[in-house]
Amino acid sequence: MVKQERAGRTRQAVLLAAAETFAQVGFEAASLVDISRRAGVSKGALYFHFVSKQALADGVRCASGREVGSAALRALRADGPALQGLIDFSHELARMLREDVVVRAGVRLGRQGPRRDGAPEVPDGRPAPV
């Protein structure tokens, strides 16, 4: 059980370091060496949990999506008018973008990160015209 807990902490440390790096410099400029140093783990430990920089970006995107999705569900389940729930959710989303580096990185990766379909991108994150 101790190994599983340590592995979980290592994975979380790598995800947080990746989120901080992606939020700061973007996907392209981020290096796995910088991420592993920031996490305080070897590059081998990073690769044990994430086979590539793309997999790491996907992990950050998923963690970000879970946080935003949880906030959306709380807003949907709240008592009161739907409009108030939408207002509350927008405030919560703004707070998360300010305070939660994982959410901030997930949004940046969604706009500027690698595309899963392999299509080239222009600098603002939109697919390049074909």
Image (spheres, rainbow, N blue to C red):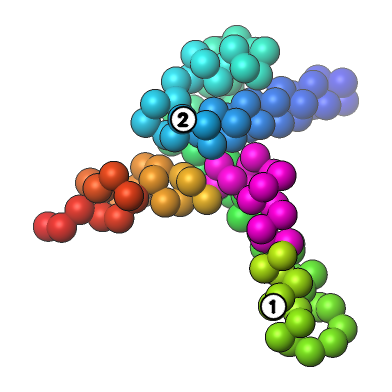
Left or right, 4 with respect to 24, comes to right
Residue 94 drawn in magenta: yes
* Front position in the image: 58 or 101: 101
**Sooner in the amino-acid sequence: mark 1 or mark 2:** 2
Callout 1: 10 Å neighbours few (<14), some, many (20+)? some
- Amino acid on which disc 2 is placed: Val
Quadrant of the rendered structure where residue 14 is? top right
Residue 45 drawn in magenta: no
* Front position in the image: 60 or 101: 101
SS for dot 2: helix
Query: Which span is picked out in magenta?
Result: 92-106
Q: Which residue bears the numbered disc 1?
A: 86
From the top left corner, tell me how far across and down residue 88 is, in percent.
Answer: 75, 72
Q: Which residue bears the numbered disc 2?
A: 25
SS for dot 1: helix
- Amino acid on which disc 1 is placed: Leu
Question: In 3D space, how far apart are the residues under numbered discs 1 and 2 (Cα atoms)?
Answer: 31 Å
